[in-house]
Image: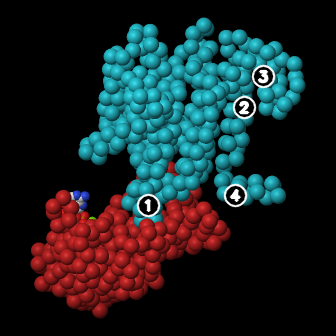
Chain colours: A cyan, B red
Amino acid sequence: MIQLLLSRVNTMLPGLYPVIFSALVILLAAVSLALSIGESPIPLSTVYKTLANKLLGANYLVDTIDAGILWEYRLSRAVIALCCGAALAVSGVVLQSLLRNVLVDPYILGISAGASAGAVAVAIVGVGAGALSMSAGAFAGALLAFALVMLLSRMTGQVILAGIAGAQLFHALSALMIAKSADAEAARGIMFWLLGNLSGVRWENAWLAAPATLVGLLVALYYARALDAFTFGEESAQSLGISVVRVRLILIFVTAMLTAVMVSMVGSIGFVGLVIPHAARYLVGIRHRRLIPAAALLGAVFLVIADLISRIVISGQVLPIGVVTALIGAPAFALILIQGAKNR
Amino acid sequence: MISIRDLRFTLRGKTLIHPLSFSVRQGEVLGLIGPNGSGKSTLLRLMAGIATPDQGEVLLAGEPVKAMSREAVARQIAFVAQQVDTHDRIYVRDAVELGRTPWLSMSNPWTDKDDRIVEQAMQQLNIEHLSDRTWQTLSGGERQRVHIARVLAQQPQILILDEPTNHLDIQSQLAILQLITNLNTTVIVALHDLNQAAQCDRLLMMQSGRLVDIGAPEHVLSPENIRTVFGVNMYRIDDAALPRPVLHFF
Ligand SMILES: Nc1ncnc2c1ncn2[C@@H]1O[C@H](COP(=O)(O)OP(=O)(O)O)[C@@H](O)[C@H]1O
Ligand SMILES: [Mg+2]
């Protein structure tokens, strides 16, 4: 029965299995390392024993402090890194397909900056008078930024430049709000958060990040065929029976939602949404039924590892994760550009 | 059957298509001719439901296209625009499979039948050997054949093609023209070459967004029409050594 189901899935998605399987194994390994490595190293055996205790109700004897660090801090942090990576990578895939431009992602298009500004407006300025959560503010900011950037790009025909202008504008707005309202110490903390930082996250954040990512992933998968139909452009998609306006609207809402949820927790993290879709396309091709799950897994792996690096690269200090993703992502992006120029 | 009733299209205050009406018969090949900018592409986009008219309507078997869902239209009308390209490294086989999109949904997943339809379309266009090639490695003629295979896989009743022989070598041009004229579906095709257009069942001649003439090729391709619309003279060469008369322009 399961055999039959698996073979059915395999004929549907040839070439996906090996990638999904290896990515899952690497993801497990990366999460294990992320749980084990840190300011106070915890042996892998303790990691697995604690997980068995918590998840399977086993009764291994483990140090309660170790168990506490593992469960309360490191695991929640790893789960959020994982969700965040998957969400940003899927957003990148969707935006690149919808806009027919492989050089866009939530960060480039200014959606992340808009989400940051929205979150800052709620958290610092007090917009919404406490009735709005930071995520809701981020969502509003993300949609506003996206609308503005799309309008500018329609008028100029320059998507990327419009995105840069939008991102700069919303970064400036955030800086303005922070300078006006926060004291120096708080401002430093916020600036640190804006660069992408997973230090403050707890389980309650994971309970928002995980369902949001799952919903985003499922909606994107539901529209996989529609996204495929965009291969030869918007009009071609339309002539293949896709309600272009509706599909666009839904998927833009979903990517804005994903970006907003992530930004309100961990700040804006660049290059994941840009570079991971390329890597995934390289591995499994351009059909979205394969591309979306592959990008989600690769993004998850990438961000768990990037977070690990951010914690250990300078001893006693945490580097913003956005710095790590940029250090890895920028050269990768350059390679993509060079490759693209060669193929032209 | 597709009918156009009193259709007008205006873009930013400029009327690109002046009110026109005509019907296309079941199974016929209707050729659209006219100088550059005469509105051929615009009219085809209106008929395919890509652009929305500001007056009049397109009727499919008597039903207004406006009232139909995008998907329902796509099951009846397939469209290849004038320039369709992608930067994606899509495989030829995958590109042809896109044609099945309007027939698929969560409750109607891909089956062996879809595989057969795709394979048949690829055979018809002689592109089976290109199956595993990516789009970027194809020549212009090969790409055009892939586009046509895709719309055949869509299994429409009406095929709308915008200058499908443009930028192709003469052999590819003739091959595509022959394929089009031998299809069982209704075909509406914009053509540049008037000698090739003469092989259609009927011709629709346009000038500055207006319908000048519609009818049999030997009627529409008259020296008077050619002079008014294209501003050149035409001489018809009837020679027993030729499969059909040749039009000479000077
Ligand atoms: N998007 C557009 N914006 C402005 N004018 C357009 C647009 N598309 C077409 N036109 C104009 O409409 C007229 C008809 O164009 P078109 O339908 O492409 O002609 P054809 O296909 O016969 O060469 C031309 O004058 C062209 O300049
Ligand atoms: Mg044209």
Dots 4 and 1 on the same chain: yes
Disc 1: residue Cβ within 8 A of ligand 1's nearest atom: no
Which is more N-terminal, label 1 or label 4?
4
- Amino acid type of the residue that numbered disc 2 sits on in the rendered structure: Leu
Residue at image location 62% in from the left, 34% down from the top: A207
For marks 1 and 2 on the same chain, the one whose residue lies earlier in the sequence? 2
Q: What is the CA distance from the residue labelled 3 to the residue labelled 1?
A: 49 Å
Q: Is residue A271 left or right of residue B189?
A: right
Q: Closer to the observer: label 4 or label 1?
A: 1
Amino acid type at image mark 1:
Ser
Which residue, as the protein is rendered here, is positioned at the far bottom? B240
Q: Nearer the viewer, mark 1 or mark 2?
A: 1
Would you say the residues marked 1 and 2 are in contact, meaning their CB atoms lie under 8 Å apart?
no
Label 2: chain?
Answer: A
Is label 4 on the same chain as label 2? yes
Q: CA distance from mark 4 to mark 2?
A: 26 Å
Mark 1 vs mark 2, CA separation in Å: 39 Å
Q: Earlier in the sequence, mark 3 or mark 1?
A: 3
Instruction: Point out the quarter of the image occupied by ligand 1.
Output: bottom left
Residue B225 place in picture, x, y as percent: 15, 82
Q: Position of residue A82 (x, y in %)?
A: 62, 32
Going from the N terminus, do you reach mark 3 or mark 2 first?
2
The residue wearing badge 4 is A11
Q: For mark 1, what is the residue?
A: A243
Asked if residue A2 can be seen in this view, the reply is yes
Quadrant containing the N terminus of chain B is bottom left
Label 1 environment density (alpha carbons within 10 Å; few <14, some 14–19, many ≥20): some
Element class at badge 4: helix
Where is residue B129? Give x, y as percent: 57, 63
Label 3 sits on residue: A47
Q: Residue at x 43, y 33 (%)?
A: A137
Give whichever of A212, B208 is nearer the camera.
Answer: A212
